[in-house]
Image (tube, rainbow, N blue to C red):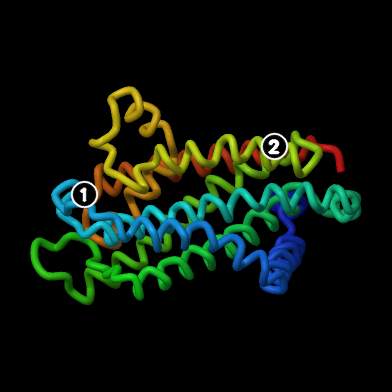
Amino acid sequence: MKTRIADVINPSAIYTLWLRETIRFFRLRSRVLGSLGMPLFFLAFLALLPVEPSSVHGLRYIDFLAPGIIGMTLLFSSTFAGLSVIWDREFGFLREIMVAPVSRVSIILGRIVGGMTTSMFQGILMLLAAFPMGFRIRGLPSGGEATTLAILIGVLLSVLFMILISATFIGMGVAFASKLKDMSGYSLVMNFLVFPIFFLSGALFPLDDFPRWMRMLAYADPLTYGVDALRRCLVGVGEFPLLLDFAALALSGAVTVWLGAYLFERAEG
């Protein structure tokens, strides 16, 4: 059994592909700026809306909005991992690594971990960018004033949920990239999916404001639970229990990562 696992999962190959994805991301400064441009636009302009605190669970709108925009950043940056797969296929790199004596499971795990790292980096940057606009972390609800411990636990838990959000949508992106052969087709399909996923997640307004039929769709959206978990961890307010958010994201992440790995294994270089 140990030999079989070692044949399937190659830590050296996973590390190499993770390092390549990370280095390539930081070398392309235009990609970093471009991926943060739209979320920053949403955060900067929507935060100026005169929204009454009573309509967003008693929070200032910037405090309600910032976790949703972090979720948006993670969604957009995670789906870019699939575009990277298509890019490597068109330029021949994917064929080279797929004929190497390394399992495709190791290849896809390296890409997923690399994508999660770059996505997490962008999510944390967006969190930091929210502070100059007035965002304040309250941490998990403690029944009184925010304490240092509540804030610390809330931030650490929010990082965990950022990882789950990234894994979910990286798996989805890789699954689509394994079936689509060109970047333009991938971009069209993902744009068709990404914006409904974002707008249904409750990132901009509470789910209570949605029509009933739209709330049903929102409950099937994994990002809904990710945004809700970030909001509860960072500002102490949420629609669902934190355990439900974790279970929904863990399940959707496991399904999309498995599907992405399954389709990638059967894809042609």
Residue type for callout 1? Val
Q: Are marks 2 and 1 in contact (CB under 8 Å)?
A: no
Per the image, the residue denoted by label 1 is: 56
**Where's residue 229, x and y in %?**
33, 51
Q: Give the alpha-carbon distance from disc 2 to disc 1, as whole Å.
A: 41 Å
Per the image, the residue denoted by label 2 is: 262
Dot 1: within a 10 Å radius of its alpha carbon, few (fewer than 14), some, or many (20 or more) residues? many
- The answer to which quarter of the image holds residue 156 is bottom left
Is disc 1 placed on a helix, strand or loop? helix
Residue type for callout 2? Tyr
137 relative to 100 in the view: left or right: left
212 relative to 265 in the view: left or right: left
Is disc 2 placed on a helix, strand or loop? helix
**Where's residue 261, x and y in %?**
68, 42
Dot 2: within a 10 Å radius of its alpha carbon, few (fewer than 14), some, or many (20 or more) residues? some
Name the foreground residue: 83 vs 96: 83
**Where's residue 125, x and y in %?**
48, 70
Q: Residue at x 60, y 67 (%)?
A: 33
- Frontmost of labels 2 and 1 is 1
Q: Pick whichever of labels 2 and 1 is earlier in the sequence.
A: 1
- The answer to which quarter of the image holds residue 176 is top right
Q: Residue at x 43, y 44 (%)?
A: 223
102 relative to 229 in the view: left or right: right
